[in-house]
Image (tube, rainbow, N blue to C red):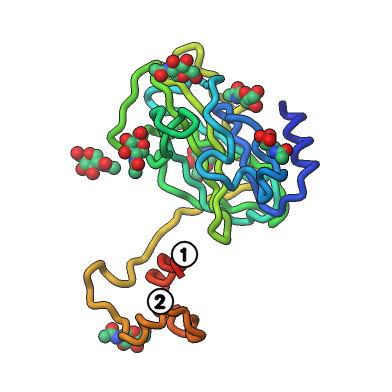
Amino acid sequence: MLFSILLAVAASTLAAAHIVISYPGWRGNNLIQNDTFPYGMQWTYPCGGLGVTTNRSYWPTTGGAVAFQPGWFQGHQTAFLYINLGFGTDGPDGGPFNLSFPMVSPFQLLGPSKGPYPGTVCLPQVPLPANMTFNAGDNATIQVVELAQHGASLFSCADITFAEPGDERITKVDESNCFNTTDLGFADIYTITRKELGAAANMTTSGAARLWHRSSTTWSWLGYLPVVAGSLWFLL
Ligand SMILES: *[C@@H]1O[C@H](CO)[C@@H](O)[C@H](O)[C@H]1NC(C)=O
Ligand SMILES: *[C@@H]1O[C@H](CO)[C@@H](O)[C@H](O)[C@H]1NC(C)=O
Ligand SMILES: *[C@@H]1O[C@H](CO)[C@@H](O)[C@H](O)[C@H]1NC(C)=O
Ligand SMILES: *[C@@H]1O[C@H](CO)[C@@H](O)[C@H](O)[C@H]1NC(C)=O
Ligand SMILES: *[C@@H]1O[C@H](CO)[C@@H](O)[C@H](O)[C@H]1NC(C)=O
Ligand SMILES: *[C@@H]1O[C@H](CO)[C@@H](O)[C@H](O)[C@H]1NC(C)=O
Ligand SMILES: *[C@@H]1O[C@H](CO)[C@@H](O)[C@H](O)[C@H]1NC(C)=O
């Protein structure tokens, strides 16, 4: 399997980093760019263009390891990483309808260079989403999201069946499949509140009008309305 992944990477000319999930096993190789996915499969929500699979991995009901290789293509000297869970069969592919349940706080990846790099990241004890419990035999999907510097996201998923911790069907986690390579660093992500919700808006009427009409002066007021402008930008 590794060989086929290497071939796919060698054959690709994509200019952006991509993820390979190495534990638990991923849905399949989605490092593909073709006529169906002209921008590359892995940019497709929620699971990088691959539907739910039946060859699931067993994963502990108490949470467990998630390992992946984030740097298969160039363009990810830094990235934000998210790990989420989805469950249920309401999705168009018979899998989860969404993957909206965060398992860890997002964190930043510090890669060694802008080029492709070989490192591996492993979180040995990813917990279940807050206030959520599952029974042995329940199915779910773990999603790894890699947010690129320009804000677009790469998606890859692993389908799991929960099992009691210690169940021998759970692939053993050790230094051979769960490690951080030394060439990768990590950083915490913070936000700083610049205006409390409900505080008087510091925006003139003419400023508001310009927001909706996308005038040539757009950029002059973007500077003091970064949050508002950022969240409305897609509507313009
Ligand atoms: C499931 O099967 C697909 C297709 O053969 C394969 O690419 C993928 O690696 C498999 N995943 C697991 C977890 O075995
Ligand atoms: C592109 O690759 C995907 C995944 O292998 C495949 O389902 C699809 O049919 C391919 N599209 C073309 C046009 O080859
Ligand atoms: C979990 O998924 C497998 C196929 O991947 C299916 O056979 C099984 O019935 C599902 N279990 C539940 C509880 O839905
Ligand atoms: C996401 O999916 C879960 C499971 O189907 C469901 O309970 C939840 O309401 C969904 N969330 C949204 C925002 O649709
Ligand atoms: C989890 O439950 C606690 C106690 O009911 C609640 O305060 C908290 O907001 C819940 N967390 C989430 C993410 O729902
Ligand atoms: C890898 O680094 C992350 C982030 O610092 C950390 O949470 C995790 O425990 C490390 N993994 C291992 C196997 O030490
Ligand atoms: C509104 O923002 C401008 C530009 O940042 C600042 O100079 C001005 O003092 C602010 N006014 C109020 C009432 O906060």
Q: Is residue 200 left or right of residue 67?
A: left
Residue 169 visible in rendering: yes
Residue drawn at x 22%, y 69% is 198
Q: Secondary structure at mark 1?
A: helix
Mark sitting on residue 212: 2
Name the quarter showing ligand 1: top right
Identify the residue at image location x=71%, y=54%: 15
Q: Secondary structure at mark 2?
A: helix
Q: Earlier in the sequence, mark 1 or mark 2?
A: 2
Q: Quadrant of the N terminus?
A: top right
Q: Is residue 166 above or below residue 75?
A: above
Q: Amino acid at mark 1?
A: Phe
Residue 98 screen position, x and y as percent? 42, 39
- Residue 164 visible to an observer of this rendering: no
| Badge 2: residue crowd in 10 Å (few <14, some 14–19, many ≥20) | few
10 Å neighbourhood of mark 1: few (<14), some, or many (≥20)?
Answer: few
Q: Which mark is residue 234?
A: 1
Q: Is residue 213 left or right of residue 25?
A: left
Label 1 near ligand 4 (CB < 8 Å): no
Q: Quadrant of residue 28?
A: top right
* Ligand 7 is within 8 Å of the C-beta of the residue at disc 2: no
Residue 226 lies, in percent from the top left, at: 42, 73
**How far is mark 1 from mark 2, CA to CA?**
12 Å
Q: Amino acid at mark 2?
A: Trp
Horizontally, residue 140 falls left or right of residue 40, namely left
- Residue 133 in the image, given as x and y percentages of width and height: 31, 27
Along the line of sight, the residue nearer the viewer: 44 or 150: 44
Numbered label tally: 2
Q: Is residue 23 above or below residue 186?
A: above
